Amino acid sequence: MCKRFIVRAALLSAGLVLTACSPKNVSYSKDIQPILGKNCSECHVPGKPGFDASGLDTSSYASLMKGGKFGSLVKPGDAFTSALNMLVEGRAHPSIRMPHGKEKLPAADIETLKNWVNQGAKND
């Protein structure tokens, strides 16, 4: 009886720790669009240099998911191979790190983008 109680208590505690460490559900409209609007849409909208060079428009979910001249930017469920994450995390060549010519995004924003992509890059 006592052993079962201890095992159950340990499993419950482990579950609570894992739940507490899990990232919150990331919302495109509440979390991602503000990051993109502040850091990307200055250049990556039609008529701006970033759009002209890459074909990438970050002004809407649909245009972001469409990608640009070099293919898709977001691979839902896989932040490690998504170009968006590689570019903002600095895992791509330094000459194409984003945002181009500006300070690296804050770690919290990079983590939010990573979590959103890993959670399936949903439009919510």
Image: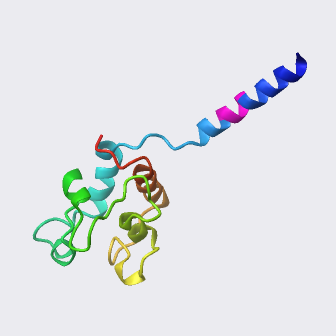
Which colour assignment does the render follow?
Answer: rainbow
Q: Is residue 99 left or right of residue 115?
A: left
| Residue 4 part of the magenta-drawn span | no
Residue 124 visible? The answer is: yes
- The residue sitting at 60% across, 36% down in the picture is 19
Q: Which residue ends up furthest to the top in the rendered image?
A: 1
Residue 12 image point, x, y percent = 71, 28
| Magenta-drawn stretch, dominant element (helix, strand or loop) | helix
Q: How many marks?
A: 0
| Residue 14 part of the magenta-drawn span | yes
Q: Quadrant of the C terminus?
A: top left
Q: Quadrant of residue 17?
A: top right
Q: Quadrant of residue 65?
A: bottom left
Residue 60 visible? The answer is: no
Q: Which residue ends up furthest to the left in the rendered image?
A: 47
Q: Quadrant of residue 49?
A: bottom left
Residue 47 image point, x, y percent = 10, 70
- The residue sitting at 38% across, 76% down in the picture is 97
- The residue sitting at 63% across, 39% down in the picture is 18
Nearer to us in this view, 120 or 98 = 120
Task: Give the vertical position of 61 relative to 103 (above or below).
Answer: above
Residue 21 image point, x, y percent = 60, 42
Task: Give the vertical position of 104 relative to 22 (above or below).
Answer: below
Task: Give the vertical position of 10 relative to 120 (above or below).
Answer: above
Q: Quadrant of the N terminus?
A: top right
Task: Give the vertical position of 116 relative to 88 (above or below).
Answer: above
Range of magenta residues: 12-16
- The residue sitting at 37% across, 53% down in the picture is 76
Nearer to us in this view, 100 or 58 = 58
Residue 69 image point, x, y percent = 21, 73
